């Protein structure tokens, strides 16, 4: 029995490895339990391969070895091709010839020349077990402990629950630049939109800036009402921030006040933040999950550009559908006067790339890494216009039906990345990155780009820090809200909690720290440069 078991160990482990590798290397975006579905699919494919080979080869040991050999090729063909192309400049035709030759030679040797297969089986088992162990060692040690220090945003007063508190709707418009940025760097006048907000009763903080210029740091900071300097080191910054989002101060405080937390994640970043939610909806449920990355490494992506185009279009159409359904859901929740004490967090990749619509709302599709799309100024402006119209529609409907039941925070996490991306394109950093499906790995290498993190240029930092930051307070609650023109996200909820609940959170000094993807452990204070 044990001998037969040994024959199948390498089949299972080599099948599971691609999924495990992606999970471990994307532990912030994915969860360990996300491995079960793709692993089952990969094992099923290997099982079918085994059954097909068994028809022609009766030796179970050889059949198992053949299965592993072919499975490795099928699951990783495009990964091997990208490696050959990046390092040797080999095109698809040459790569296909190399793959075909290697497979034929290996199968020939196994079938005709090698009679004793036990040693090969042992080698494959040892190799597969070693790969799995090495992969697991790549997990942050904190995943097995609870050693991340949580923020202690305490307040002195005892606050009583009041069922008449308004809903709090926190809308993140990812990558939405301030009017100052749009005017100076894009030549675009966005005052019509912000004037419309003011007419509706919003306070628009005209000189607001982000505390951090990238999403996962900015959102982690704002939801904890604090800076994150001492929470990040070079080894596992992203995972440390993920742990902080799991215990974010804002939803934790509001849940103590009797609020129900509803989470809409349109960025695909925050499966961790959802753990606090009573109700949740994520774009990752039908889109950015591990199956697509497995597809991009497989033989399917290698042999057919058309299939890749269809996958990308499916990604974008899923995103469009999710956005529309989420806007509808938010309106229904907010307009119902019987539903109160809801904290609604809704994160939209608007006007952040990928640009899914033109300014008229017509669908467009772009087969490029979303990060690279920042270099398209006109597409960004068109998406701003589309976003403005959509937000007017949603907020207009909410306020028309329930003006006194909802606090609304309309805020971007950061501004435009145009000049940073332009610099990286000109320096050749994106040379081998031309697919949306490459974007996740790409972000990990950005720290190696030629950006001067310690002394960044003005044209890089001013556009990326200037943000939209607007607040709507119902008249019945509009007592003495101390918003001000230069408020930053770390203080947004401090002001609201102090005035709505009579809490006594001290306001922090508004500061700005420059960093970028893959370099969260480098945080340069650029507050004075932004003035």
Image (cartoon, rainbow, N blue to C red):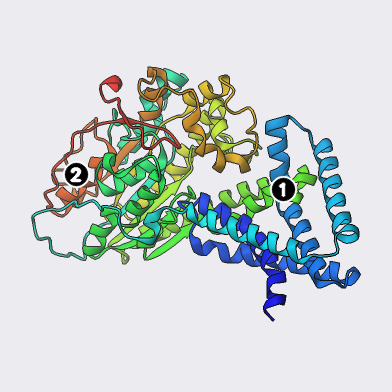
Identify the disc placed on residue 458. Answer: none
Question: Considering the image in quadrants, where does the N terminus appear?
Answer: bottom right
Q: How many numbered markers are drawn? A: 2
Residue drawn at x 60%, y 36% is: 369
Q: Could you say which quadrant of the image residue 89 lies in? A: top right
Compared to residue 496, the image places residue 117 above or below, namely below
Residue 382, position as x, y percentages in the image = 54, 31
Q: Nearer the viewer, residue 91 or 471?
A: 91
Q: Are marks 1 and 2 in contact (CB under 8 Å)?
A: no
Q: Which mark is drawn over residue 495?
A: 2
Please identify the quarter of the rendering in which residue 143 is found: bottom left
Indicate left or right for 374 with 506 as reference: right
Q: Residue furthest left?
A: 157
Rate crowding at label 2 as few (under 14), some (14 to 19) or many (20 or more) other CA atoms within 10 Å. many
Where is residue 323? Give x, y as percent: 51, 50
Numbered badge on residue 310: 1
Q: Earlier in the sequence, mark 1 or mark 2?
A: 1
Classify residue 146 by image quadrant: bottom left
User: In this image, 216 relative to 105: left or right?
Assistant: left
């Amino acid at each position: 029995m044990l001998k037969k078991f040994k024959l199948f160990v390498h089949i299972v482990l080599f099948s599971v490895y691609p999924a495990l590798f992606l999970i471990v290397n994307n532990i912030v975006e994915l969860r360990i339990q996300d491995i079960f579905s793709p692993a089952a699919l990969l094992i099923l494919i290997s099982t079918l391969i085994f059954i097909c080979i068994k028809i022609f080869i009766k030796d179970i040991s050889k059949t198992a070895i053949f299965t592993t050999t072919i499975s490795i090729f099928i699951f990783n063909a495009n990964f091997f091709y990208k490696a050959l192309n990046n390092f040797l400049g080999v095109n698809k035709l040459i790569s296909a010839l190399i793959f075909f030759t290697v497979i034929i030679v290996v199968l020939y040797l196994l079938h005709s020349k090698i009679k004793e297969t036990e040693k090969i089986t042992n080698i494959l088992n040892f190799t597969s077990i070693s790969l799995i162990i090495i992969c697991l060692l790549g997990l942050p040690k904190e995943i097995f402990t609870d050693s991340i220090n949580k923020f202690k945003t305490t307040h002195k007063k005892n606050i009583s629950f009041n069922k008449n508190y308004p809903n709090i709707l926190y809308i993140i418009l990812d990558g939405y630049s301030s009017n100052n940025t749009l005017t100076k760097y894009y030549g675009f006048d966005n005052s019509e939109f912000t004037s419309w907000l003011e007419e509706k009763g919003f306070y628009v903080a005209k000189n607001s800036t982000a505390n951090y210029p990238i999403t996962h740091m900015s959102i982690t900071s704002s939801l904890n009402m604090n800076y994150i300097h001492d929470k990040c080191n070079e080894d596992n910054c992203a995972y440390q921030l993920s742990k902080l989002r799991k215990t974010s101060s804002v939803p934790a405080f509001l849940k103590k006040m009797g609020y129900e937390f509803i989470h809409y994640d349109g960025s695909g970043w925050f499966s961790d933040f959802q753990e606090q939610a009573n109700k949740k909806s994520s774009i990752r449920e039908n889109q950015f999950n591990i199956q697509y990355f497995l597809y991009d490494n497989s033989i399917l992506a290698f042999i057919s550009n058309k299939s890749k185009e269809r996958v990308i279009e499916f990604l974008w159409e899923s995103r469009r559908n999710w956005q529309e359904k989420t806007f509808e859901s938010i309106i229904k929740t907010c307009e119902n006067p019987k539903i109160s004490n809801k904290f609604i967090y809704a994160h939209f990749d608007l006007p952040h790339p990928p640009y899914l619509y033109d300014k008229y709302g017509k669908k467009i599709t772009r087969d490029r890494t979303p990060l690279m799309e920042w270099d398209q100024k006109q597409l960004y402006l068109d998406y701003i216009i589309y976003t403005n119209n959509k937000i007017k529609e949603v907020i207009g409907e909410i306020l028309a039906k329930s003006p006194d039941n909802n606090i609304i925070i309309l805020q971007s996490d950061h501004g435009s990345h145009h000049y940073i991306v332009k610099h990286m394109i000109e320096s050749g950093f994106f040379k081998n990155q031309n697919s949306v499906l490459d974007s996740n790995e790409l972000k990990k290498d950005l720290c190696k780009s030629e950006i001067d993190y310690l002394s960044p240029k003005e044209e890089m930092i001013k556009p990326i820090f200037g943000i939209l930051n607007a607040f709507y307070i119902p008249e019945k609650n509009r007592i003495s809200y101390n918003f001000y023109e230069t408020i930053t996200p770390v203080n947004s909820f401090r002001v609201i909690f102090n005035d709505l609940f009579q809490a006594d959170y001290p306001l922090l000094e508004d500061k700005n720290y420059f960093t970028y993807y893959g370099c969260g452990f480098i945080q340069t204070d650029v507050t004075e440069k932004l003035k």
